[in-house]
Image (spheres, rainbow, N blue to C red):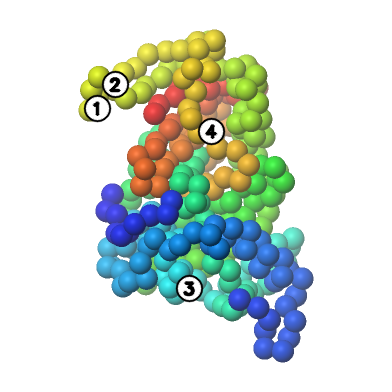
Amino acid sequence: MLLVLTAFMTNSCTGGKSPSAEEEAETDSLAADSLAADSTADLVADAPLPKAVDELFDDFFFNFAGNRRMQMSRIVFPLPVHADGRTTMLQRRQWQRSYFFMSDGYYAILMDDIAQDTLSKSTSVGETCVERLDFDSGRAKRYVFRRLDGEWRLTSITHTTLAQHPNASFFQFYKRFATDDDFQTESLGDFVLMTAPDSDDDFSEVTGSISPEQWPAFKPAIIPSGVVYFVDYGQHCSSDERKVLIVRGVANGLNIEMSFERNDGRWCLVKLSE
């Protein structure tokens, strides 16, 4: 992947009219996304970016999240915000800068099959969504980006609930899996196939299997919970029987793949790769 970043981290009323309740709520929500802004200095320089930044969505988005000037220039204002069956138009001066998942240092991808991961490296993708899922409150926010005239732009935001999400059934399971150690162990297959780097050879991997009793020693260091950002490159997840969840780091080499299958109505972790 071509990385164009120089470094990784990882406003108000409308001309005499008071903003609507929906606009105020959206502004507050955006501010919540930007908690790191007040305490974290910009590590991505506000400098002109080469055209190659728009070839892959990831290259664009990392700069979009880290570069204040670019973020403001790549939003289509007034920005449609859909919530509770209503649409309001967010004005440029109401936008609160967001770092998205940069302060976390990772994001997640959900798909039916690992082969779908090729979409993240495809230059032909024309629409991508970044979803902010709050497993504690059950709320979801979907940022829709489209490639317009060769440049990625944020074109709308939709507020919804996790219960309305196409992957609601899996997410209901995952919320508990991510936070309950006993439930994790109960949700393992008889043996979990595991692939990990070879400690004796930096360029090789070792593959084996672990039993539920061995899980505490081999479980991933990060199993995202709480507020988690997911990137949807257009995978169109439709399977009710298989899911692959990838946790991918921002310029830190992190890459965790967890494969789940549903048997007799129960989701189970069957494969782990790091």
Question: Mark 2 or mark 4, which has the lower sequence index?
Answer: 2
Q: Amino acid at mark 3?
A: Met
The location of residue 258, given as percent across then percent down, is 47, 29
Question: Mark 3 or mark 1, which has the lower sequence index?
Answer: 3
Question: Mark 1 or mark 4, which has the lower sequence index?
Answer: 1
The location of residue 241, given as percent across then percent down, is 56, 27
The location of residue 181, given as percent across then percent down, is 62, 22
Q: Secondary structure at mark 4?
A: loop
Q: In terms of image quadrants, where is residue 213?
A: top right
Q: Secondary structure at mark 3?
A: helix
Q: CA distance from mark 4 to mark 3?
A: 32 Å
Q: CA distance from mark 3 to mark 1?
A: 41 Å
Location of residue 128 with respect to 14 vertically, above or below: above
The location of residue 72, given as percent across then percent down, is 48, 73
Residue of label 2: 198
Q: Amino acid at mark 4?
A: Ile
Q: Amino acid at mark 1?
A: Asp
Residue of label 4: 223
Q: CA distance from mark 3 to mark 2?
A: 44 Å
Viewer-side label of 3, 1: 1
Location of residue 195 with respect to 90 vertically, above or below: above
Q: Secondary structure at mark 2?
A: strand
| Neighbour tally class for label 2: few under 14, some 14-19, many 20 plus, Cα within 10 Å | few
Label annotation for residue 202: 1
Question: Mark 4 or mark 3, which has the lower sequence index?
Answer: 3
Label annotation for residue 72: 3
Q: Amino acid at mark 2?
A: Asp
Q: Are marks 1 and 2 in contact (CB under 8 Å)?
A: yes
